[in-house]
Amino acid sequence: GAVVSQHPSWVICKSGTSVKIECRSLDFQATTMFWYRQFPKQSLMLMATSNEGSKATYEQGVEKDKFLINHASLTLSTLTVTSAHPEDSSFYICSATRSGVGTQYFGPGTRLLVL
Amino acid sequence: DAKTTQPNSMESNEEEPVHLPCNHSTISGTDYIHWYRQLPSQGPEYVIHGLTSNVNNRMASLAIAEDRKSSTLILHRATLRDAAVYYCILRPLNSGGSNYKLTFGKGTLLTVNP
């Protein structure tokens, strides 16, 4: 099956620091990757769509300068939360699709706690 | 985006079948019906999808109404590991890039009793 990994699985950081989360497709080439955020007891909210080699498309209300996305290869996308604040504490989940297949394969998520 | 409506929660007993309903009365002719589920503290996982005909796979069955305005996800024998939030999502047929994006609603929280 298609496997997507995320690293780290959890991170605690101080307010004002930046945190990078990696999303990798382990056994397929992902033409498109998506980043979601999920607050406790809520549903997943799409933050941005990332296509390899091009700029990410951000959803309305998501600050592109705060949530930097880089999709440098067909197997790796990174999300950097810059100058993190406590309100950025959340569960961040990535997913990946491959060309011609509409199914999304999700990573296990990264839990971010900003103190 | 076409919306879906699901019950907030459902309960089932272990080893019994579960029928999870989804209404999507504004579905367009080119929308696929996708189901994903999210176990506690994990990322979602794909369950099944269909367009017009009923579908079966090793995880579940998907029954689609003839007018496509509703569908039902069927778990034939619920286990404790099936306890999760189940999301019914419509996705456009057109392929590529951001057209693959999914809009998650609140889903149905399935509790399975031993």
Image (spheres, coloured by chain):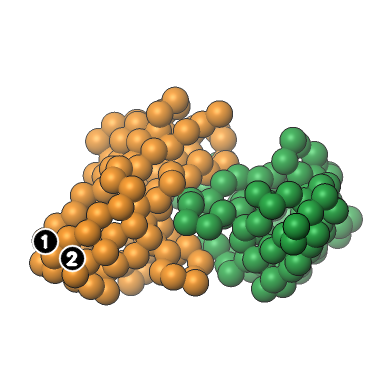
Chain colours: A orange, B green
Vertical placement of residue B76 versus A89, above or below: above
User: In terms of image quadrants, where is residue B66?
Assistant: bottom right
Image point (25%, 54%), residue name: A11
Quadrant into which the C terminus of chain A falls: bottom left
**What is the secondary structure assignment of the residue under circle 2?**
loop
Up/down of B110 relative to A71, above or below: below
Residue at the outermost right position? B66
Q: Residues within 10 Å of mark 2 (few under 14, many from 20)?
A: many
Frontmost residue, B68 versus B74: B74
Residue B90 visible in the snapshot: no
Residue B47 lies left or right of residue B105; in this view the side is: right
Same-subunit check for callouts 2 and 1? yes
Asked if residue A16 is positioned above or below residue B86 in the image, the reply reads below
Query: What amino acid type is highlighted by mark number 1?
Result: Thr
CA distance for labels 2 and 1? 6 Å
Q: State the image coordinates of residue A76 (x, y, percent, origin top left).
A: 31, 35
Report which residue position mark 1 lands on: A17
C-beta proximity under 8 Å, tags 2 and 1: yes
Check disc 1 and report its element: helix, strand or loop.
loop
Q: Nearer the viewer, residue B83 or A28?
A: B83
Residue at left offset 45%, top offset 27%: A28
> Chain letter of disc 1?
A
Q: Position of residue B7 (x, y in %)?
A: 72, 72
Q: Which residue in the protein does label 2 denote? A: A84
User: In the image, residue B57 lies at what x, y percent?
Assistant: 75, 37
Is tag 2's residue or tag 1's residue first in the polypeptide sequence? 1
Quarter holding residue B46: top right
Q: Position of residue B34 (x, y in %)?
A: 66, 51
Say which quadrant the N terminus of chain A sits in. Answer: top right
